[in-house]
């Protein structure tokens, strides 16, 4: 009886070759072509620049009016529409002093105290020299237009009333009630009297 030769060696070799083939296949990396990114994910450099440059916001309409007018150059009545400018802001008629010009009164040197003293002096002048024509709006204001303005404004009237109806005799009681100035002050009250623009509409 003829015996067959053992095939273990060949079988072992075949098994090893299969393992090597599988290992090689497992370690091979499949390179896939990259897909193009969707339109909304493309780099910004590839986008068309269609955005318009940012525009500065328009300036407030009250800045289109002059900050100061002499008494004889009267502004329109408050709220009057002026072509190319808009609605007329509030103007106050009065005198402008720096904080170093005026002497403090009995009520103190801040705006509130100066206001109280001014109104009391104005009322005393009116009682002593009563006239039918006078302005009913005495006041002391501060920083009426811009943030860095800390001057005091002694107000005799505003353009809430028609400025064309206001005459020099209407504010004489207020002028007589102005506070005394410091010895070093060189302010001429007639030079600083006029219409001052505010930021109020």
Image (cartoon, rainbow, N blue to C red):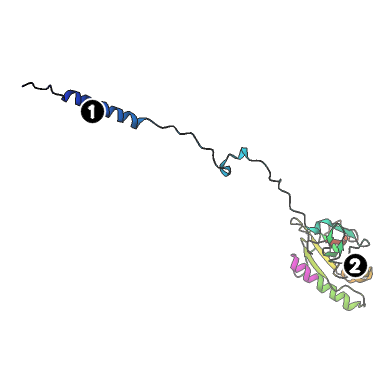
Give the number of the disc on residue 15: 1
- On whether residue 111 falls in the magenta region, the answer is yes
Which percent across, then down, holds residue 122?
A: 85, 73
Quarter of image, res 124: bottom right
Residue 41, placed above or below residue 189 = above
Q: Residues within 10 Å of mark 1 (few under 14, many from 20)?
A: few
Going 81% across and 74% down the picture, which residue do you hit? 120
Choose the circle earlier in sequence order: 2 or 1. Answer: 1
Q: Residues within 10 Å of mark 2 (few under 14, many from 20)?
A: many
Which percent across, then down, holds residue 178?
A: 85, 67
Looking at the image, can residue 184 be seen? no
In the picture, measured across the screen, residue 152 lies left or right of residue 4, that is: right
Which residue in the protein does label 2 denote?
163
Which percent across, then down, holds residue 160?
A: 85, 69
Judge by depth and name the residue closer to the eye, 125 or 132.
Answer: 132
Which percent across, then down, holds residue 13?
A: 22, 24
Judge by depth and name the residue closer to the eye, 111 or 68.
Answer: 68
Report the magenta residues as a range: 107-117
The C terminus - image quarter: bottom right
Rounded to the nearest angstrom, the CA distance separating label 2 from label 1 is 112 Å
In the picture, measured across the screen, residue 52 lies left or right of residue 163, that is: left
The N terminus - image quarter: top left
* Discs 2/1, front: 1
Q: Residue furthest front?
A: 1
Element marked by disc 2 = helix
Residue 32, placed above or below residue 167 = above
Quarter of image, res 126: bottom right
Going 27% across and 28% down the picture, which residue do you hit? 18
Element marked by disc 1 = helix
Quarter of image, res 40: top right
Judge by depth and name the residue closer to the eye, 62 or 18.
Answer: 18
Residue 7, placed above or below residue 155 = above
């Amino acid at each position: 009886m003829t015996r067959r030769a053992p095939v273990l060696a060949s079988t072992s070799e075949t098994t090893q070759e299969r393992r090597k083939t599988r290992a090689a296949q497992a370690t091979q990396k499949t390179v896939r072509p990259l897909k193009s990114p969707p339109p909304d994910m493309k780099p910004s450099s590839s986008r068309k620049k269609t955005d318009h440059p940012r525009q500065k916001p328009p300036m407030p309409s009250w800045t289109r009016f002059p900050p100061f007018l002499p008494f004889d150059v009267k502004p329109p009545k408050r709220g009057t529409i002026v072509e190319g400018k808009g609605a007329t802001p509030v103007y106050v008629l009065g005198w402008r002093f720096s904080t170093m010009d005026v002497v403090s009164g009995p009520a103190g040197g801040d705006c509130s105290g100066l206001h109280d003293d001014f109104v009391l002096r104005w009322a005393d002048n009116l009682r002593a020299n009563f006239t039918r024509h006078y302005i009913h709006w005495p006041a002391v204001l501060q920083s009426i237009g811009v943030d860095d303005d800390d001057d005091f404004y002694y107000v005799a009237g505003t353009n809430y009333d028609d400025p064309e109806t206001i005459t020099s005799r209407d504010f004489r009681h207020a002028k007589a009630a102005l506070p005394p100035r410091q010895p070093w002050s060189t302010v001429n009250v007639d030079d600083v009297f006029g219409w001052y623009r505010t930021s109020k509409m």
